[in-house]
Amino acid sequence: MTPFQSFELTQMGGNGDQGNLTAINYFTAPMSIQSYHGDTGGKLLQKTAFAKSAVDIGKEIVALTGSTSPSIVKDKDKDGDKIIRLIGPSSYGPTDDNPYPTFEAYLKAIAAANQATKIQNINAFKKPPTGGDEYDLYSFMLDLTATVDDKTAQLTGNITTTIAQIKDQKRESSKSGPTFDNATVTISASDQNAQNFVIYGQAINSKVVTFGPGWKSLGTYIQEVGLEESVLQTLQNLAIGEITSGLLMGFVNSSYVPSGSTPLKDMPSEKWWTLNPVVAFSDVQNNPNYYNQYANVIYKASNNGCYSIPYSDRLGRGPLVNSVQYNGETVDTWVVTLEAPVSASPAADII
């Protein structure tokens, strides 16, 4: 078995193309990315990196699940029983026994507090999807309220529509479209493993996730106006991503008050992503059961410079590094550095 660590790079030619460091699925070794205008002797544009060694990070991750956890993959064929990688909670499927802490205690605390959280965000889609000099821009705004009944999370509210006509990159006109009421989303606690999968993986699982009639009406409208069929699932993922990001990062029911602001629990979700300075996880919750503890380790060790949950790019500047253009300057060079992996030291150093 060989240790390896992934990073992502998109370079299709668009100015917004990006890449990132990611430790969502597993952690093997710290990495860094530096981008330059020119070669490595040119102008440094962006840098993201870990600030801790693999051994130090490994110790913190192992402490979350115990030294015999299936989250620890070892090479049995080598002397010293070396650790190959540490598996993150997002990698466990809906039928797996996820060794990381569940969100049962957090969900029960939200229910006991009778906390209601505003879930608001917007996504826009071009028709035709390739855009060009002239196109229609359909914007869909989520306006939902999230509550918890015991351990079941539910979002209720509506989705509003705005249609703008774009010509030569300018908005020529704009009008309101239909509003879709009863846009409910339910994440049931009927199956603990499946619910953990939805929260940790930030993914829809039909076994515990149901969508109300408003979403069906929205899907019909999307077809009628000629938008791509994938738009509906993108919007459903947006709703799931907002509430699960709030749970994973500890924003829901958090009494933490950013400077000159209101408590996080009373903010609409779209405000969480623009906080300056960035706060999340153990920054905003004293109880470690009220956030994704694995992601907190990665978030702290990389200063939010690595994907610790699937939607880390929502938070602040996030972990994204441009690969084509940055602030009007061409990205000519990427330098990716891999530091010493966990297997460089005996497993005893970590567990």
Image (cartoon, rainbow, N blue to C red):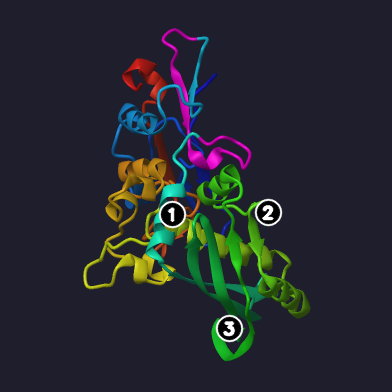
| Gap between marks 1 and 2 measured at Cα | 22 Å
Disc 3 secondary structure class: loop
Q: Say few, some or many: other residues with alpha carbon within 10 Å of mark 3 (under 14 / 14 to 19 / 20 or more).
A: few
In reply to whether residue 176 is colored magenta, the answer given is no
Name the residue located 45 percent from the left edge and 54 percent from the top edge. 107
Q: Position of residue 171 (x, y in %)?
A: 55, 87
- Mark 1 / mark 3, whichever is N-terminal: 1
Q: Does residue 108 show up?
A: yes
Q: In the rendered view, tell whether residue 205 sits above or below residue 254.
A: above
Residue designated by label 1: 108
Q: Where is residue 209 in the image (x, y as percent from the top left)?
A: 63, 57
Disc 2 secondary structure class: loop
Residue designated by label 3: 168
Q: In the image, what residue type sits under mark 2?
A: Ser
Q: Say few, some or many: other residues with alpha carbon within 10 Å of mark 2 (under 14 / 14 to 19 / 20 or more).
A: few
Name the residue located 59 percent from the left edge and 52 percent from the top edge. 203
> Which quadrant of the figure contains the C terminus?
top left
**First to last magenta residue range:** 78-98
Q: In the image, what residue type sits under mark 1?
A: Lys
Q: In the image, what residue type sits under mark 3?
A: Asp
Name the residue located 41 percent from the left edge and 72 percent from the top edge. 268
Name the residue located 74 percent from the left edge and 80 percent from the top edge. 225
Residue designated by label 2: 206
| Gap between marks 1 and 3 measured at Cα | 51 Å
- Name the residue at the top extreme: 79
